[in-house]
Amino acid sequence: MNPLERLLELQAHDTRIAQLEHRHAQLPERAELRELESQSEELAERIAAARQQHAELERLQRRYDDDLALVLAKRDRERNLLYSGEVTAVRELQSLEEEVAALGRRQRVVEDKLLEVMEDLEAAATELASLSQSHRELGAGMDSVNVRLGTAAAEIDAELDQVRLARADVGKDVDSGLLERYERLRSQIGGVAVARLEATSCMGCHLTLPLMEVDRLRRLPEVGEAPPGEDDKGTANCPSCGRILVI
């Protein structure tokens, strides 16, 4: 087989490898997973804020519980003293009555605040539970996407292994100098270093070459057929894109 035909075969394998690697990197499951991860991070921040709010409301509830306990204890002491008969002076009895009344008003204020906090705490607990449930469901969704991603990636990896093995077999048949030139051109011309010349068109850049140039290229010696003493480039190159041409 013409060595350049083998080079075309090598190029086909390299092109397929590049396609598979691109497909591997651009699997839709990756984008889906990134979106879910972003949602998960946002949800985690909301959960952290909800937990902080819930904790603050719990601290506020404990404070009002303590305040209410102190008010009730003091009111009971003052009321017991008021009705104990130990105090007989009118001024002192009036003072005790006023204190008991004030403590009663304070009790109602604290109870109202406590009730409000308890309602807020219940709402906060409901929100936290809802957010946590959503986060768990999101985690399950991410697990499912990861499974699908692993399956899709494994299929591509299996094909990649086959193509790379086939590429290695073809590469063994290509002259080392030609292979080196091919690899150098691949890095310079977007991964495609060799193309077929069909009629007067380069299939690499798809430009039409002048007839005289095509005739000159067709007259070049094939690989390994250069006259003695001449540098055997063994290839024709497209004057437009520089790719190796298979004629």
Image (spheres, helix red, strand yellow):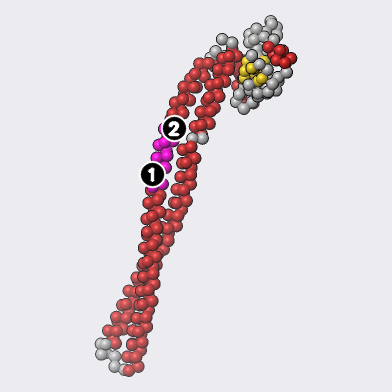
Where residue 179 appears, as percent x and y from the top left, is 59, 17
Give SS at disc 2.
helix
Where residue 3 appears, as percent x and y from the top left, is 59, 12
Q: Residue furthest right?
A: 212
The magenta-colored residue range is 137-151
Q: Is residue 65 above or below residue 48?
A: below
Which three-letter amino acid code belongs to the residue tagged 2?
A: Ala
The residue drawn where x is 74% and y is 14% is 212
Q: Is residue 65 something one can see in this rendering?
A: yes
Is the residue under label 2 in contact with that under label 1 (CB below 8 Å)?
A: no
Q: Which residue is mark 1?
A: 140
**Residue toward you, 85 or 11:** 11
Q: Is residue 41 above or below residue 28?
A: below
**Residue toward you, 43 or 213:** 213
Q: Quadrant of residue 190?
A: top right
Where residue 87 appears, as percent x and y from the top left, is 29, 90
Q: Residue furthest left?
A: 84
Give SS at disc 1.
helix
Q: Which residue is mark 2?
A: 152
Where residue 5 appears, as percent x and y from the top left, is 58, 14
The residue drawn where x is 27% and y is 89% is 86
Mark 1 vs 2, N-terminal side: 1
Distance from label 1 to label 2 (Cα)? Answer: 19 Å
Which three-letter amino acid code belongs to the residue tagged 1?
A: Ala
Residue 203 belongs to magenta span:
no
Q: Is residue 189 above or below residue 55?
A: above
The residue drawn where x is 69% and y is 21% is 208
Main SS class of the magenta portion in the image: helix
